[in-house]
Amino acid sequence: MGDNYLSIANSWGMWIAVSAIIFVVFLQAIRITRIAFRAGREIGMTGGQLWTAFRTGLTTAIVPSIAVLLGLAVMIPKLGIAFPWMRLSVIGSVSYELIAAGAAANAMGVDGLQGDFTGLVFANAVWAMSLGVVFNLIIVAFFTPRVKWLKEKVAGGDEGWMKVMTAAAFFGAVGYMVAQPVVKGGSALMALVGGFASMAFLGVIITVGKQNWLKEWSLALAIIGGMAVAGLAFAHFGIGG
Amino acid sequence: MKNKDQVFKNSFLTPVERIGKYTLLAASACLFAPALYLYFFHGLMPPFGAIIGGAVAVWSFMMVMAVVEPIVYYPILGFGGTYMSFLAGNVLNLRVPVSATAQQVVGTKEGTPEAEIVSTIGIAGSVIGSQLVMIIGVLAFLPLIGQIQESTAPTAVKIALDQVLPALFGALGGIFLFRVPLLGIVPLGLGFIIALINPNLPYSIVIPPTVILSIIAARIMYNKKWVKGEGMM
């Protein structure tokens, strides 16, 4: 099953290649922090206030980031560890990355992430996951100072509609992908049902049990739940495989 | 007061805009380092049509997000925060709450230069915090790589690992059914009709039209006030 490409995906060169952008993330955060500290003092803020803001940000980020790590874990078997690390450290989210990887495999004539991955399929996933988000960066790079102008241009500034439109675009993209496993059946259908049931269960715990902290863990946990159902359905009932 | 706004513009807004723009452009270039590494060092270059096919499928929903998200979150993240948040990601689940918490803890008034500085520094702290957590986590995962790749794993485990994408779709279905069931009707219905006709079509052909039809249906529901923007993102 194309074992070879994972040794490339986890090779030293790959680690170096993914580190470049993470270096830029650090550089940007440190440079902007220094500018903000200096400007803050010039307009009369105290060092204590500024450090409090920094510390609050740093500590608030820890738990949600550990939840992101759980999402990283589910990507490792198919995509290695170096590239998912980069994609979840920069711009990405677990859902977007997995969908992009699946779309790239589909474009290579492979049955999503369930199909046999080869070096070329992996390379196409890397291209799709990178090309897919490049405009996000470019738009922010050029339009942040003109964001009010952009807002008027897009949907006449109607923020409610903009949110609905974004959700509708996402639904439109996944509608067919959700239907495929149902039609095809087997392990994929088991995983789909398992993921759905896990999320419904977590949703009940979060809303009825008022366990809000679970929210940021729920997606990764539901994915793992769905995968587990697919594995168990095969082991105990011989479904799929 | 006028003097303070002038100072704020000269020593904050102008330099942040310059750094923000250049780092994001540098990041856009670095984004392709892994793809180019695979090509130059391992000769792995997918056919041009496959690259475009994958990209078109992703762009058909990402482009909307790429434009809308900065507009919607800018008022919360602020100027400096926007540059950093869209590079580091996790905007909704991490950067937005961080900005609000930092402003609350320091006790600044919304819309003032002080609030902008505090939001910026808080988000910068959160970016550094999440990168450190990710690095530590990845180091902890490293010893496990060999085990995951062992082909001696039982078949049931291999099957489970292969099904990550359908599991994700099930989970997403759960989220959307709870939050916005109406919006899902048209795209899911279309998806099922197309899948029943042929479940093995290229996404680059299926996704762009279903995205457009889903947006049209959403527009009609929005105009009729069946759906609202609240709780959507």
Image (tube, coloured by chain):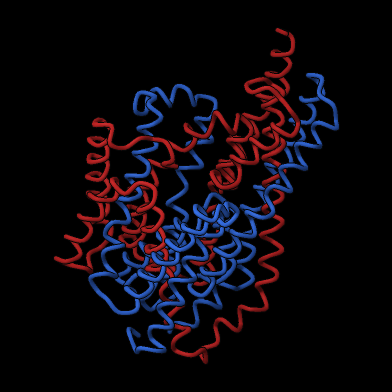
Q: Is residue A89 rendered to the left or right of residue B221?
A: right
Residue A61 to residue B9: above or below:
below
Residue at the extreme top: B2
Residue B128, position in %: x, y?
Answer: 71, 48
Q: Nearer the viewer, residue A38 or A190?
A: A190
Residue A167, position in %: x, y?
Answer: 37, 44
The hue used for chain A is: blue
Residue at the extreme right: A47
Q: Is residue B39 rendered to the left or right of residue B51?
A: right
Residue B167 to residue B126: above or below:
below
Residue B49, position in %: x, y?
Answer: 30, 60
Q: Could one spot residue A186 in this view of the protein? A: yes
Residue under the image location 72 percent in, 56 percent down: B132
Image-quadrant location for residue B79: top right
Residue under the image location 27 percent in, 76 percent down: A185
Give the red chain's letter: B
Residue A1 to residue A165: above or below:
below
Q: Nearer the viewer, residue B212 or B202?
A: B212
Q: Which of A117 and B214 is in front in this view?
A: B214
Position of the C terminus of chain B, as image quadrant, is top left
Position of the N terminus of chain B, as image quadrant, is top right
